[in-house]
Amino acid sequence: MVLNNIDSKIDVLVNKYKTRDPFVIARHLGVKILFEELGSIYGYYNQDSRIKIIHLNSKLNSSELDFTCAHELGHSIFHPDSNTPFLSSASLTSELKIEKEANYFASKLRIDNSHKDFELNGKYQILDYYGLPYEMELFI
């Protein structure tokens, strides 16, 4: 997957559904979202009988839920038939190609450039503004 393809897909989704909210986009795409107690796991994606399912840890805060949902939504779009690893704090920096693509998708989906209306100094302030993990700094 080329990152330009991911950018193009984000543009299509945002223009079609008029939102960057991963929960709303998932609903429009027919992806089921389940909230579960997952311990230290943030979430994961799987497909069961052609039903796409995002599993989210019910203990996450709203920023973590938004990012994790966007990350797993990326898997449902770009890696629908893959068994994706669990997302956790330890795997945020995974070198696996599919994990980098899902992180890129999640970061770029959340960044709408509204931060440019403010004087933010550096990547970490931008990440804070969007509620993204600091590990996503390479996508800014």
Image (tube, rainbow, N blue to C red):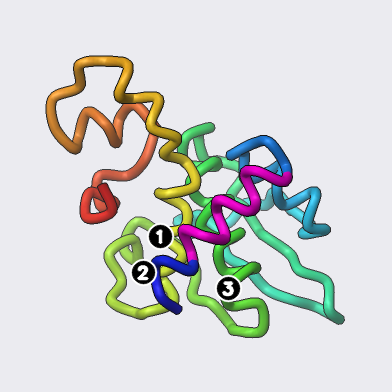
For image coordinates 29% across by 36% down, the residue present is 127
Find out whether residue 22 is within the magenta segment: no
Give coordinates of residue 55: x percent, y percent.
66, 59
Front residue of 94/111: it is 111
Q: Which residues are magenta?
A: 6-16
Q: Earlier in the sequence, mark 3 or mark 1?
A: 3
Give coordinates of residue 36: x percent, y percent.
68, 52
Which residue does the numbered mark 2 point to in the structure image? 100
Q: Secondary structure at mark 1?
A: helix
- Disc ID at residue 78: 3
Classed neighbour count for the residue bearing mark 3: other residues with Cα under 10 Å, few (<14), some (14–19), many (≥20): some
Q: Amino acid at mark 3?
A: Phe
Classed neighbour count for the residue bearing mark 1: other residues with Cα under 10 Å, few (<14), some (14–19), many (≥20): many
Magenta span: predominant SS is helix
For image coordinates 41% across by 75% down, the residue present is 2
Give coordinates of residue 135: x percent, y percent.
25, 52
- Disc ID at residue 103: 1
Give the CA separation, mark 3 to mark 1: 12 Å
Q: Secondary structure at mark 3?
A: helix
Tell whether 139 sits left or right of 53: left
Which image quarter holds the N terminus? Answer: bottom left
- Disc ID at residue 23: none
Q: Amino acid at mark 1?
A: Asn
Does the residue at mark 3 contact the one at mark 1 (Cβ under 8 Å)? no
